[in-house]
Image (spheres, helix red, strand yellow):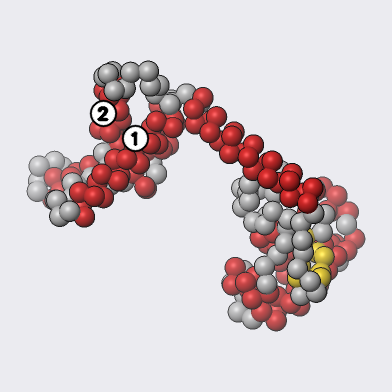
Amino acid sequence: MYYRIKNWEKFQHYHTRRPPWIKLYHDTLEDYQIGKLSDAAFRFLINVWLIGSEDINGILPSSEELAYKLRIDDASKVDRLLNEIACSIIASDKPFSIPEERREELEKEKRQSASDDSFDKKSKPVTSEWLAEIKKNKAYAEIDFDLELSKMDTWLTTDKGAGKKRTRQLVFNWMNKAIEIKAKSSKNGEPKQKTMEEQRIEAIRNGQIT
């Protein structure tokens, strides 16, 4: 059996899948069928709405996959819950297909979203607050973020950096390149450079700072 969220387009806001949130309308409170659901079934319905947001057309995965995602030990329990929330899903014995006009619309939204992301990286200013947030990313833990930023700013003043702007995209590219170089150095057997936090901890252990 295949399942799809009923009136899924109504819940959408973000173009990309796995959005940070979905719409939940106030008239849900007035829906008699939803109001009759048990507490367990209502919680299951909310989870199903969230999982449905991972698909471009609100199509749900199999009962077994739902059981895995929701940490339910028995897929048959999922089947029973799916039957209980039948008022909010569409069941079919055949796979759902996306109408051609909807497919074209989704492709257009995807291209627009990609264009918007690219525009943001190029147009939004590189502020100290933004840099502080990026620096917290664990992906950059193996490099000296501030040192690399200083290198980048110096490079922008050279002939090679002439005409380049201090954009968010440049910061991402520079830091990712620094990570790549660091990884290659480690792979070639060169001593691994300690992070600033590792250096601080070692200094404390050696009694150099208190």
Which structural element holds mark 2? helix
Q: Residue drawn 69% across and 41% down?
A: 108
Q: In screen coordinates, is 19 left or right of 79?
A: left
Q: Residue drawn 34% across and 38% down?
A: 175
Which structural element holds mark 1? helix
Q: Residue drawn 88% across and 57% down?
A: 31
Residue 204 shows in the view:
no
Residue 193 shows in the view:
yes
The part of the image, by quadrant, that contains residue 160 is: top left
The amino acid pointed to by label 2 is Lys
Q: In screen coordinates, is 156 left or right of 114?
A: left
Quarter of the image with the N terminus in it = bottom right
The amino acid pointed to by label 1 is Trp
Residue 41: x and y in percent read 75, 69
Residue 61: x and y in percent read 67, 67
Check disc 1: other Cα within 10 Å, few if <14, some if 14-19, many if 20+: some
Residue 7: x and y in percent read 82, 54
Check disc 2: other Cα within 10 Å, few if <14, some if 14-19, many if 20+: few
Residue 36: x and y in percent read 86, 66
Which residue does the numbered mark 1 point to in the structure image?
A: 174
Which residue does the numbered mark 2 point to in the structure image?
A: 151
How many badges with numbers are in the image?
A: 2
**Toward the viewer: 180 or 149?**
180
Q: Which mark is residue 105?
A: none
**Toward the viewer: 161 or 193?**
161
Nearer the N terminus, badge 2 or badge 1? 2
Q: Height in image: 117 above or below 190?
A: above
Label 2 close to label 1 by CB (< 8 Å) = yes
Q: Height in image: 101 above or below 73?
A: above
Calculate the distance from the C-alpha at mark 2 to the C-alpha at mark 1: 9 Å
Quarter of the image with the C terminus in it = top left
